Structure formats: structure tokens, C-alpha cells
Image: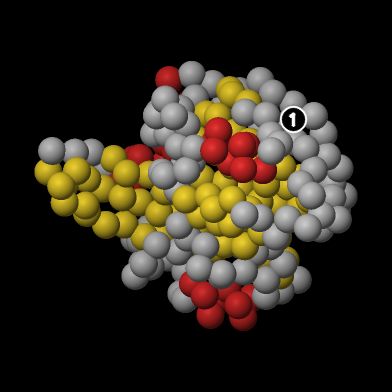
Amino acid sequence: MRRTVLLASLMCWGGAVMAAMPPPVPPLTEISWKAASREAPSEGFALGSAIVRFEKTTLGEIAAAVSEGVIDHQGDAGESEYWLCYSRPREGQRIWIVSSGEMGGADHLVTGFVAEQLPAVAGTTDCPALPATTAVVLSGHKGWLGMSTMDVRKHFGVPSHESGAWQAFNYAEKLEGVCDGAGDRTNWLLIKQADGRVQTIVAGQVTSC
């Protein structure tokens, strides 16, 4: 069940393109390895004063806190997704904050995000530029794009899986008292490195029955 839900949540990022700038498709959608992390590698991130927490924060709350943002949508049924996109021109970074249409519910709870280091970035109508003073960091102050290979190992330990330039850190647990018994929570962090630095971060969490 955990594998199926995580796969569905990741796969929804690859739906038909119906907006100018949808989230990129992550590479590791075939989850066949064991979740080896002892704790959730990421519970979200800080976007300036806005604290983004998986399955707790809504897209609307983020847009209100940042005073900027357009909630876009694509797909339907299991491939439905909603997102906010933000640009950081000075840092050359773009961030997509995603809510699975199925797992995020009617309130569009955040179920994941993608952050990429790019050669050049400019703000657009559907992916506006954040103020230059907006700091971004993974929950628990565990770094961000550009962190070193040494910092990745320090913060996240041994990956659950490696494939080329990508490393996957996966965590799974049973939750008592939800779903009329016990639910399954899966949390993941995918990192792509180049030249000893993190170039892409894909993270998320879903809880299923």
C-alpha cells in the first residue's frame, strides 16, 4: 500500500501539460526499494516567514503568507494536481509547491514540492519572483539547493536508493488511530547532485488508509 500511494503521488506530476509551467516530472517513480530512513527526511520547508508543512499547510495559506502566487491545476482523478510556482531570479532557482488532487483534499493540502537550480530564472505571471530577501530552507534547517555532498550525508544519512546522480531517502510508518485503525505514512526526499552540490530537490509526504 505504501509503495502504491507514493508511486501514484509521484506519477501525478507527469500528467498532461495544461499550464505554462507545471512541476517537473521526477525520475524515480518505480519505488521498489525499502524505506531505510529512521525518520522523515523532510517535513516541509520555510519560505520566508511562511512555514510549509506536508499535509498540514494549504496552497491558499502559502499564497496569502507570501502575498503572491497563482494556484494552477492539471489532470483529473488520480492524476489531478494543484500547485504554486515561485522564482528566485538572483539565486537561479524555481520552486513548485504541489497538492495532489486526490491526497491533498478539497483544501489543497501540500503533499510535495520540487526545487531546481537553473542556469537562468525570471519571474513570470504564473511563477512570480519572490522578494530578494526571502530565505528558503528545508525543515529542521537542513540546507537547500547548493548544499554540498558532505552536508547531504550529514543531514540525511545513508540513502535508501541511488541511481546515477540521484539519491532517494525514504521513510515509512504506521499511524494508529487514523483510517479507522492504522494508516500508512510515506515520506520521501529525492536529491540530484552535480559537481558536489545539490541541483534538484523533490520531497513530499502522503498518509493513506
Secondary structure state at the residue bearing disc 1: loop
| Circle 1: residue type | Asp
Which x, y percent locates residue 76?
48, 19
Residue pointed to by mark 1: 126
Which x, y percent locates residue 129?
80, 43
Task: Please name the residue shown 82% across and 54% down the image.
Answer: 132
Task: Please name the residue shown 36% across and 67% down the image.
Answer: 39
Left or right of 83, for residue 178: left
| Count of picture labels | 1
Considering depth in this image, is 39 or 193 the residue closer to the camera? Answer: 39
108 over 43 or under it: above or below? above
The reply to whether residue 163 is in sight is: no
Residue projecting furthest to the left:
181
Task: Please name the residue shown 27% across and 57% down the image.
Answer: 173
34 over 32 or under it: above or below? below
Considering depth in this image, is 148 or 196 the residue closer to the camera? Answer: 148
Left or right of 186, for residue 15: right
> Which quadrant holds the C terminus?
top left
**Crowd band around label 1 with a 10 angstrom C-alpha radius: few (<14), some (14–19), many (20+):** some
> Which quadrant holds the N terminus?
top left
Which x, y percent locates residue 191?
59, 60
The reply to whether residue 75 is in sight is: yes
Considering depth in this image, is 127 or 149 the residue closer to the camera? Answer: 127
Left or right of 91, for residue 2: left
Which x, y percent locates residue 172?
31, 57
